[in-house]
């Protein structure tokens, strides 16, 4: 993490909005959580999928610039393994949803939108996207996931208060998330 670039971005951006862009919720056909005991493992995913800079012309002399970060999050309930690999039907893997493993999923893409108070270089924006955006959307994701699980009659899931992000391996240059 480059703290100097991160600080530049934090000073030059202001959170403007967080919204839900896309969602998908499924329950496997063979599974009815209302009438079957659930012995499942809960697996999580979260990743930054992309970011972009928008210039909005609202009729004023100065264009308004927005920095958008797209964050994909998800939870799935996976049946705890009771079969051995040799019992999985031919041509299917244990991670294949049709092999009897995946019971339910809740997935979403959130957009965190920031007003650009000053011009920032791509490296600073990438550093900010990697280290701040997930923290900004996390409370919205926790609420959405909990309420969807309740609506779907799935077992209560308590996501952690803060995301635990594995940091990317340090390379000579930061990954370029911003699409030009």
Image (cartoon, rainbow, N blue to C red):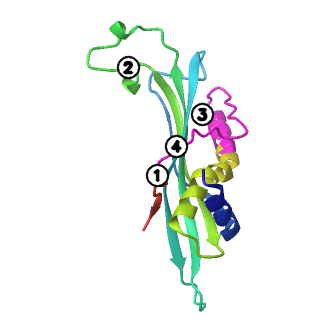
Q: What number is the disc on residue 99? A: 2
Main secondary structure of the magenta stretch:
loop
- Of the numbered discs 3 and 4, the one sitting upstream in the chain is 3
- In this picture, which residue range is highlighted in magenta? 142-171
Q: What number is the disc on residue 152? A: 3
Q: Which of marks 1 and 2 is in front?
A: 1
State if disc 4 and disc 3 touch (CB < 8 Å). no
- State the separation of the CA atoms marked 2 and 3: 22 Å
| Residue designated by label 1 | 172
Q: Which of marks 1 and 4 is in front?
A: 1
- State the separation of the CA atoms marked 3 and 4: 34 Å
> On screen, 15 above or below 175?
below
Q: In percent of the image, x 65 and y 40: which residue is there? A: 163
Q: Please say whether residue 176 is one of the residues in the magenta stretch.
A: no
| Residue designated by label 4 | 168
Q: In percent of the image, x 67 and y 49: which residue is there? A: 135
Q: Nearer the viewer, residue 36 or 11?
A: 11
Q: What number is the disc on residue 135? A: none
State if disc 3 and disc 2 touch (CB < 8 Å). no
- Of the numbered discs 2 and 4, the one sitting upstream in the chain is 2
Residue 68, image x, y percentages: 55, 63
Q: Name the element at disc 4.
A: loop
Q: In percent of the image, x 58 and y 15: which residue is there? A: 39
């Amino acid at each position: 993490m480059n703290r100097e670039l991160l600080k530049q971005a934090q000073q030059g951006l202001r959170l403007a909005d967080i919204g839900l862009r896309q969602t998908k919720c499924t329950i496997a056909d063979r599974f009815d959580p209302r009438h079957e005991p659930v012995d499942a493992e809960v697996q999580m995913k979260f990743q930054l999928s992309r970011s972009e800079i928008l210039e909005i012309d609202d009729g004023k002399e100065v264009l308004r610039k927005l920095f958008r970060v797209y964050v994909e999050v998800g939870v799935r309930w996976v049946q705890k393994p009771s079969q051995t690999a040799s019992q999985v039907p031919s041509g299917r893997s244990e991670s294949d949803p049709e092999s009897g493993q995946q019971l339910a999923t809740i997935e979403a893409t959130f957009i965190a939108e920031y007003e650009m108070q000053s011009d920032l270089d791509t490296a600073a924006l990438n550093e900010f996207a990697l280290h701040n955006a997930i923290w900004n959307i996390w409370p919205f994701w926790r609420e959405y996931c909990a309420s969807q699980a309740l609506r779907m009659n799935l077992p209560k899931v308590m996501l952690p208060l803060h995301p635990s992000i594995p940091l990317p391996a340090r390379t000579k240059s930061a990954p370029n998330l911003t699409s030009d």
